[in-house]
Image (cartoon, rainbow, N blue to C red):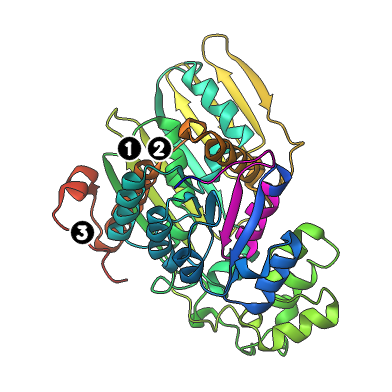
């Protein structure tokens, strides 16, 4: 059945009221959408979210299954729950006829991703995965330059994802994405953005992939001799780059940092509140005494059917900045830093710089993905309102293709081989990622 639209714009239900769900919801409301239901197991976050958006009590659920078991309560659903929940929730949402914005990654296995693709296809629903890097003003300028033939044919690409030392500690050593068996490999949970983006920039799916990387630093072997398991009591905390006290106390007074990452640690935005929270929080643990196992650095080499090559580097040991990219073509070179694009033209031997708009909400690397979050929500709402998905830059099958590159790269990393994507996708059962 179809839901009636009104002049207020599409209505949305949100599953998962954490940082990403709240961010999408606020952006949707700012652009004319209405938040009419929420599912969130954490009572305090559920209550805060419902109060902020004025959601009727009967549309506030502790469990996503209860929201999705009812008749459709909104035009669309935003799924920003933990990664392991995505598959079941997305399939149910498609079967209920919801348009859907699904946070990346789609799911944690190729089989589950395929289930989502099939369910969305059967429903004919508007569907988007949160590949926000495709939607930034920066990417739009860069893509237009490349597609115009300004640098000729792309020959090779260097692409860097500077995760940021404190971001790695927060999310991938202490936080929710620290373990592959609970969330997925780093390349999926963090960097499927980047492999999807490279495919978009080149306009091809890679033919072959290899990869190297490991957990090199955040291990017990690198723990200082006098360090304790908690930063609050550690006598050498002040000399540690990854001190939880330093990372989180620096967030105080900065609205962007208080929203993320500090809101994941405490709601008490005072020095005393932060220190009290760190005493018994996972975020107060010594980074050398955690149960993390995802890599802290990785390189991926890609070969495309055209012969173009790309190298991708993900590393924890940087400042938290925009991605940086150099694209080498037959007629010129492009260098980009997420904010500006510089083109050196071989024919004229001149360099030009194109600055992308930085007046949008969330222009920083730490908030809003350089405007990508805003633009994705705008495109999704337009697609829901019209029933026409053409405003969306990718679809379910495109996202699955990018995720397959991730799993092929992980297999290559564990097995020390070069993986052919043709062999991977034609295998009766996808080659498993080998244990580390």
Depicted 388 relative to depicted 251: above or below: above
| Tag 1 secondary structure | loop
Q: In the picture, which quadrant includes the C terminus?
A: bottom left
Report the magenta residues as a range.
Answer: 3-28
Residue 199 is marked as: 2
Which residue is labeled 1 in the image?
Answer: 205
Q: Which comes sooner in the sequence, label 2 or label 1?
A: 2
| Tag 2 secondary structure | helix
Which residue is labeled 3 in the image?
Answer: 431
Tell me what residue is drawn at x 52 percent, y 14 percent: 346
Residue 278: x and y, percent?
71, 83
**Alpha-carbon distance for marks 2 and 3?**
21 Å
Residue 46 placement: quadrant: bottom right
Residue 409: x and y, percent?
32, 53
> Within 10 Å of the Cα at label 3, are there few (<14), some (14-19), or many (20+) other Cα atoms?
some
Residue placed most toward the observer, 349 or 106: 106
Residue 254 is marked as: none
Whether residues under marks 2 and 3 lie with C-beta atoms below 8 angstroms apart, the answer is: no
Residue 8 is one of the magenta-drawn residues: yes
The answer to whether one can see residue 210 in this image is: no
Q: Is residue 163 left or right of residue 125?
A: right
Q: Is residue 24 left or right of residue 312?
A: right
**Alpha-carbon distance for marks 1 and 3?**
18 Å
Residue 296: x and y, percent?
49, 64
Depicted 289 relative to depicted 423: above or below: below
Residue placed most toward the observer, 194 or 402: 402
């Amino acid at each position: 059945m179809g839901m009636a639209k009104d002049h207020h714009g599409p209505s949305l239900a949100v599953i998962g009221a954490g940082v990403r769900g709240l961010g999408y919801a606020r952006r949707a409301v700012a652009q004319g959408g209405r938040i009419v239901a929420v599912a969130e197991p954490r009572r305090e976050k559920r209550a805060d979210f419902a109060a902020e958006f004025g959601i009727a009590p009967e549309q506030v659920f502790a469990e996503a299954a209860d929201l999705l078991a009812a008749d459709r309560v909104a035009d669309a659903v935003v799924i920003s729950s933990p990664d392991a929940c995505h598959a079941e929730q997305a399939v149910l949402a498609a079967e209920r006829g919801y348009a859907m914005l699904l946070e990346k990654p789609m799911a944690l296995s190729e089989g589950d991703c395929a289930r989502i693709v099939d369910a969305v296809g059967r429903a004919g629903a508007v569907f988007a995965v949160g590949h926000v890097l495709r939607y930034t003003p920066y990417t739009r300028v860069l893509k237009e330059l490349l597609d115009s033939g300004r640098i000729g044919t792309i020959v090779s690409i260097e692409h860097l994802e500077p995760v940021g030392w404190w971001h790695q500690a927060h999310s991938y050593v202490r936080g929710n994405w620290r373990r592959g068996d609970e969330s997925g490999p780093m390349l999926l949970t963090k960097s499927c953005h980047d492999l999807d983006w490279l495919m978009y920039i080149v306009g091809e799916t890679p033919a072959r992939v290899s990869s190297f990387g490991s957990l090199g630093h955040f291990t017990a072997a690198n723990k200082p001799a006098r360090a304790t398991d908690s930063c609050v009591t550690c006598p050498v905390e002040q000399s540690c780059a990854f001190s939880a006290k330093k990372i989180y106390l620096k967030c105080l007074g900065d609205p962007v940092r208080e929203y993320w990452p500090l809101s994941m640690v405490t709601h008490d935005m005072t020095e005393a509140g932060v220190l009290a929270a760190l005493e018994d929080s996972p975020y107060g643990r010594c980074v050398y005494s955690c149960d993390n196992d995802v890599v802290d650095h990785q390189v991926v080499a890609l070969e495309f059917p055209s012969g173009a090559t790309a190298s991708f580097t993900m590393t924890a040991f940087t400042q938290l900045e925009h991605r940086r990219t150099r694209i080498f073509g037959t007629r010129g070179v492009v260098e980009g830093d997420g904010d500006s694009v510089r083109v050196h033209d071989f024919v004229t031997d001149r360099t030009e710089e194109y600055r992308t708009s930085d007046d949008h909400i969330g222009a920083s690397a730490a908030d809003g993905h350089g405007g990508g979050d805003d633009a994705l929500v705008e495109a999704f709402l337009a697609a829901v309102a019209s029933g026409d998905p053409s405003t969306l830059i990718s679809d379910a099958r495109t996202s699955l293709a990018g995720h397959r590159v991730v799993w092929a790269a992980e297999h290559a990393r564990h097995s020390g081989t070069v993986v052919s994507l043709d062999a991977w996708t034609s295998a009766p059962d996808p080659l498993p990622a080998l244990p580390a």
